[in-house]
Amino acid sequence: MVWMAGDEGAEVERARGGDQDAFRGLVHRHSPAVFRLAYRMTRNEQDAEDVVQETFLKAYRRLGQFESRSLFGTWVHRIAANCAYDLLRRRARLKEEPEDDETAPPLPATDPSADRLVFSGEVRLRLAAALARLSPAERSAFVLRHHEGMSIQEIGVSLGLETSAVKQSIFRAVRKMRTALGTLEGAPS
Amino acid sequence: VSGAWHPEEEDLILFHYGEAVDPRLPLHLEECAACRIRHRNVVEVLALAGDAPVPERGADYGERVWRRLAPRLSSPESHLRRFGLPLALAASLVVAFLLGRHFPPPSSAPIPPPAQQRIFLVMVGDHLERSEMVLVELSHAGPTSMEGEKQLAHELVLSNRLYRQTALKEGETGVGEVLDELERVLVEVGNSPEHVSAGETKALQRRIDGLLFKIRVVGSHVKQREKEALPATVS
């Protein structure tokens, strides 16, 4: 069955009334984007799949709280961001890593010339390593700002953080990525 | 260049994302070559960071998500009704399987060992999948939202015990050990008091997170063996 993007508001209303087929349509339409968000935040396919399940389960149970003025996609992405952030924090606690790592030492970087780095796979490897080492707040805030285009304020609401904490998380994330890459001064534009 | 003022890297990041910044910044970037380079470097790092690949999910992904999700959407009561019958059926199949293996009826042909093994693998694989779903839900639950999962955990204990005993009897030590750990968690969840403190919930969720990994590894191994056992059964 192919689900077409139609009048989503009506679909949400039907789902609220207990029509599971309508909710199925919403799941079909939004699950790929929710997976992308979850994967970018968790960097792990199985964790991302769990976040997708948890997101739609929570969305279904909270349909009564959904305000028709908003877009369902935006709403469900906020839930996904929150689920993924919770999972990251739990993982960090399990590994006994600081949840908000302000004092983490800079990532090792040999500072090879940017010209050589930019066009090599090493850039991707270094960035992947840097992203994997960001704290839950840093990675979540960065992904939501960079990939989801959420405003700093929206991110704060989604993650339950103060605006200033969101900003600092993004700044630290970018700084760590820059450190991982070494200086890009003089890189070809 | 507008005075001695130069933007911080934080300002350049916010500017890139279209957030509110010092109103002097756009004009300053036009006038200050050094800050233009710094700005370009920030933009390049952010562009590279946005390039990280995400695994493809395929055109049927929405339906796959739905199939896994749909059984969990009912109310806890109807969820139990849905789950209850398959669990009872599975448990009785295990009993029948054990009785048939160790006390085969004289008039019927014995079930060949490959088929017996496949039956066991299919049932254990399904049981691990169900248990995983309940544990995933528990690992995300708050202290006040565990009631439905507690009932399900209670239901799963009986069948888990039978599968564990069968696994150990058949020399499936790895499966047996994971089922043993699963059983202890399920009993704990099923018997947990009505009001669980946040600390107790966190402690339980830590155990569940560790167990989930083992269940996935063993579950994946069981499914693989199930597939490998299929041709022998069919031929």
Image: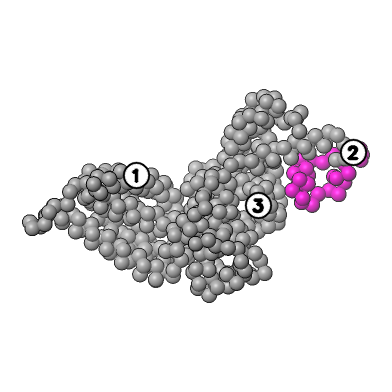
**Residue occupying the point 67% across, 47% down:** A146
Circle 3 is placed at which residue position? A148
Picture coordinates of residue B13, whole percent (x, y)? 75, 44
Front residue of A35/B175: it is A35
As measured in the structure, the alpha-carbon distance from the residue carrying label 2 to the one carrying label 1 is: 64 Å
**Residue occupying the point 80% across, 34% down:** B37
Circle 2 is placed at which residue position? B31
Amino acid found under the numbered disc labelled 1: Gln
Q: Secondary structure at mark 1?
A: helix
**Residue occupying the point 70% across, 48% down:** A167
Picture coordinates of residue B186, whole percent (x, y)? 35, 57
Q: Secondary structure at mark 2?
A: helix
Give, as a single range, the part of the protein colored magenta. Answer: B1-28
Nearer the camera: disc 2 or disc 1: 1
Chain label for disc 3: A
Picture coordinates of residue B103, whole percent (x, y)? 11, 55
Circle 1 is placed at which residue position? B224
Q: Is residue B7 magenta?
A: yes
Quadrant where the C terminus of chain A sits is top right
